[in-house]
Amino acid sequence: MNSPARNVTRRRAVAFTLIEVLCAIAIVMLLAGILSTALVRAKVSAARKIVCVSNLRQLHAAYALYAADYDGALPPYQNSLGVGHFDGKILHENPENGEKLVTTLHPYLKNRDVWFCPADNFARTDSTVGFVRHLYSSYKVQYRFGLPVITGNVVTFDDEKQVSTSKATLMTDNLMPYSRPDSAQLPYSHNGMYNTLFMDGHVKTRPWQSASPDDEL
């Protein structure tokens, strides 16, 4: 038989002190707080990505309406190098970085908010990052070296290059990871992902590591 003294000793060996219990509770609460913060950030990032995708689809609708009025031609656009295309002529002017494009599409869109990604910390500031002046837009137009014309499911560029509209990039989140992966030209992303709008209107979310000069169609 076990003596009373042995039973008391055994109970003391398996018992927890108040300090140990409080420490365990504190650790659990800390871990729960960290997990909760991570979940909130993930939800916010997912919500921003959804809004960004919606913005790009609305912008495509405006492009499509413009193209319908101008025999399939997309609106003129100047890049930050000051090279623009209009009526088949190459224009070398002062760079405007999106102002003319926003103005041209305004009658078809009218909602300025769709030009700005909610994840863009430079939105509506006079900052030029990655060939985009964020005062006017968060998005990078990809046909800056040619004025494309869409006929059916095919887009034809100034150099007569023809690409399926399902493969030709129209706009992307403003980032250039394939050329400068560590540079300040990566103003924002969606948890390491970026959205791409194609000329047929579909939007694809891809890892920024997958970006390449092929996006510059």
Image (cartoon, grey):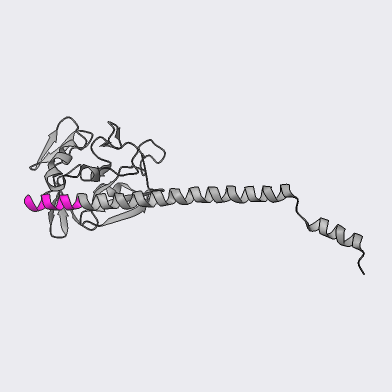
Can residue 9 be seen in the rendering of this structure? Answer: yes
* Residue 170 rendering spot, x and y as whole percentages: 22, 49
Q: Does the magenta segment cover residue 64?
A: yes
By secondary structure, the bulk of the magenta-drawn segment is best described as: helix
Seen at 56% across and 51% down, the residue is 32
* Residue 2 against residue 75 in the figure, above or below: below
Tell whether 208 sits left or right of 171. right
Asked if residue 105 is positioned above or below residue 163 in the image, the reply reads: above
Q: Magenta span covers which residues?
A: 60-70
Q: Nearer the viewer, residue 134 or 204?
A: 134
**Nearer-the-camera pick, 195 or 25:** 25
Q: Residue at x 82, y 56 (%)?
A: 13
- The residue sitting at the bottom extreme is 1
Report whether residue 161 is seen: no
Say which residue appears at 30% left-offset and 37% top-offset: 123
Could you say where residue 183 lies in the image, as x and y percent from the top left?
A: 39, 36
Q: Position of residue 138 (x, y in %)?
A: 28, 41
Specify the quadrant that holds the N terminus: bottom right
Locate residue 120: give its quadrant.
top left
Quarter location, residue 175 = top left
- Quick one: 211 or 187, which is closer to the camera? 187
On the image, the x and y values in percent for residue 23 come to 68, 47
Which residue sits at x=54%, y=48%? 33
On screen, 120 above or below 165? above
Q: Nearer the viewer, residue 116 or 85?
A: 116
